[in-house]
Image (cartoon, helix red, strand yellow):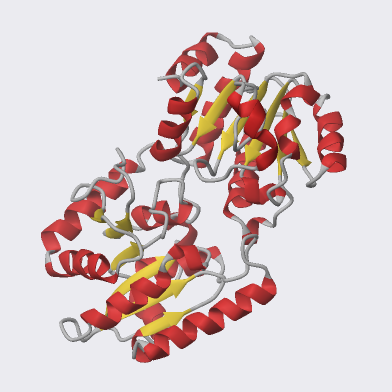
Amino acid sequence: MPRVAMLHGRADPAHDGVADYTARLVAALRAAGDDVLDVPVDPGPRGTLRAARLARDADVVHVQFAPSAYRFSSWPGVLPDLVRRPLVTTVHEYGWWSPAPWRLPARLGLADTETGRLVPGSRTVITTNAAHEAVLRRRFPAADVVRMPIPPNISVADGAGGPDRAATRARLRIAADAEVVVFFGFVHPVKGLRYLIDAVARLAPEHPRLHLLVVGGFTSLALPDDEAVAFRAELTAHVAQAGATDRVTITGHVPGGEVSAALRAADVAAFPFTAGATTKSGALLSAFDHGLPTLVTQTAPDDELVDGRTVVVAPEVRDVDVLVTGLRRLLDDPALAARVAAGGRTLLAGRDWPALADRHRELYAACTGASSGAASSGAAEVRR
């Protein structure tokens, strides 16, 4: 198999979803016996040039791209012209950012407004979800765009042998008979939790045992320590203003086993993201893996997140009313809840880290022309 240089930002996997994804992928590739050179890229010209020098020892260069991972620097966009190796780029964030330096080259067809030369200069572009894939195909119809859905970042197996549902609720001081709505993930203003808190408070007269459990840390790449402390204080104050202090529990960051236990102790999951939810969210997929009927906000149709089949969709963002309606549907209709929970779990069929690593190995072999018959058939599969 070819040697792969994996280029990525320097974020801590405990505080950044893309960093966590990259660390898990590298571990899965190495577990399969692949030679992977792990190359953190510091923002700016010096860090980009250093990464390009290290990557020249590889047969394939794979860039994990999200603008926040490089502190919104445009320098990673020149990597295709520095590494001189077959390049693969995974686009984790796309469709919303446009750094000024690339606008003229983009109009000339030489660059992409969001990734610089990365997308037009890559042999293959990997996307993790339908929304990003649609934008990429519209902007670059001739590009080799491959969707490789991510696995859950917390699986049921992470909580195996842990406390049962009743014990977890007791530890969290949540009533045994409560109807628990859980949110899991990094806590940030764009996650829409203010609206979810208000929706839970508004539903309290109909569902007096309703309880919201927020599982996740506030400190992240997008929300440094001081801002995280301020936002936690702001969110706690919002809970009090909503009159929901007794029905909202915020755990902060907890280990994976405790996350799994919390998900198993819940009845419904909710992801009210202000930009809409997609299956690039490992937290959302973790809720599916734990068999939770799930509510998501949505800003555009998604072939995986389908109302009444895999999720219940709140069709507007930043809207308490639609969240109330969506939660009411799940709480009041057990048949619907069971159907979307089953649909969510079915969506995850075949999604695990070893399988994802296998698809990458096939793609790398195809990029270098080193594919065996098995790798060639796999490469054809990833281009479906």
User: Is 9 placed left or right of 125 in the picture?
Assistant: right
Where residue 187 sits: x, y (%)? 51, 68
Q: Position of residue 254 (x, y in %)?
A: 55, 71
- Give the left or right position of residue 314, taking residue 26 as reference: left
In which quadrant of the rendered view does residue 367 lie? top right
Q: Residue at x 80, y 46 (%)?
A: 42
User: Is 214 or 108 nearer to us in this picture?
Assistant: 108
| Residue 286, x across and y down, in percent | 42, 55
Quadrant of the rendered image containing residue 300: top left
**On the rendered image, what quadrant is the N terminus found in?**
top right
Front-most of 237 and 331?
237
Task: Residue 134: name its quadrant.
Answer: top left
Q: Is residue 307 above or below residue 26?
A: below
Say if residue 80 shows up in the picture: yes
Between residue 349 and residue 41, name the one nearer to us. Answer: 41
Question: Residue at the spot x=34%, y=60% of the render?
Answer: 317
Which of 160/124 is in front?
124
- Residue 51 x, y percent position in the rendering: 82, 36
Give me the residue at 46% from left, 51% from top: 281
